Each structure stands twice: as structure tokens, then as C-alpha cells.
Image (spheres, grey):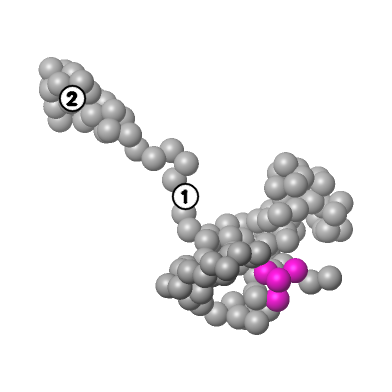
Amino acid sequence: MTQDWQELTKLTRGDSFTIEKVKMVGRDISIEGSFKLPPLAMLTAEDQLFVMAFVRCHGSIKEMEAIFGISYPTVKNRLNAVSERLPILDVNPPSPARDVLEQLDKGEISAEEALKRLKG
């Protein structure tokens, strides 16, 4: 049985779209507006299944090879292709403290100024 989200991705054929109405299942509540889908929902149905399998395998490429019957390089290439279609997520965003310490290290500010900024 095909899931509803798979049907939606097949209908849109990769074209960009927005959701204009959301209806709560089992309730008489609807919300209208212009809603963008999250990045993962904008992937093709096949790529969404691939990502879900990767998460279920806890990132094990060996398990992915077994599930899909593909080689290690193919799994890596597919993951790289999917990641290129997702927005960049900085897992280590710069912190104000790091910026201050970098400025101090470069000699751009004094130790006193660094302490003042870190406390402030």
C-alpha cells in the first residue's frame, strides 16, 4: 500500500509547491495559509525511503548495503546526492565566546576587552 506522502511526491514530480490548507485528522479544525514543507519532505519518495532506512539502520552502511543490495560506494554516492539537496546545517554554529577568543588570539582586542565581552 502506497503511503499518502509517496503519492504527494509522485504528483508533484519534484516541482516546488506550498501547502495552503491543513486539516486536523479526526477534528473539525482547518488552518489556511501558505506553508512550506520541511526540507526532508521535499525529497523524492525514493530518497525519503532511503533516508528513513539509513536512520533505522543507525547509519550503518553495511546494513544499507544488505537492505538495498547495493555496494558501499553506491550507498555513499546516494547519501552524498541526498545531502546535496538538503540545506546546509551548521552543527557547530559560532558562539559569541568563540568569536571573542578568536579576536583575542588574532590580537584584535586586548585581554581586558575580551573579559569584558565574555562577562557582558
Crowding at dot 1, Cα within 10 Å, few <14 / some 14-19 / many 20+, comes out as: few
The spot of residue 8 in percent (x, y) is 65, 75
Viewer-proximal residue, 74 or 23?
A: 23
Q: Position of residue 51 (x, y in %)?
A: 68, 56
Q: Nearer the viewer, residue 57 or 73?
A: 57
Tag 2: residue type?
Answer: Gly
Q: Tell me if label 1 and label 2 are in contact, CB under 8 Å.
A: no
- State which quarter of the image contains the N terminus: bottom right
Residue at left offset 64%, top offset 65%: 25
Determine the image quadrant of residue 59.
top right
**Residue drawn at (72%, 59%), measured in percent from left and top?**
50
Disc 2: CA contacts within 10 A as few (<14), some (14-19) or many (>=20): few
Image location of residue 3, percent across then percent down: 75, 69
Q: What is the secondary structure assignment of the residue under circle 2?
A: loop
Vertical order, 107 against 28 (above or below): above
**Count of picture labels:** 2
Is residue 114 in sight in this rendering? no
Magenta stretch secondary structure, dominant: helix
| Residue 79 within the segment the image draws in magenta | no
Q: Is residue 109 above or below residue 29?
A: above
* Residue that mark 1 sits on: 89
Q: Is residue 44 left or right of residue 53?
A: left
Quick check: 60 above or below 101?
A: below
Which residue carries the number 2 mark?
Answer: 120
Kind of residue at disc 1: Leu
SS assignment at label 1: loop
Question: What span is colored magenta in the figure?
Answer: 3-7
Which of these two is toward me, 2 or 44?
2
Can the viewer see residue 37? yes
Quarter of the image for the C terminus: give it.
top left
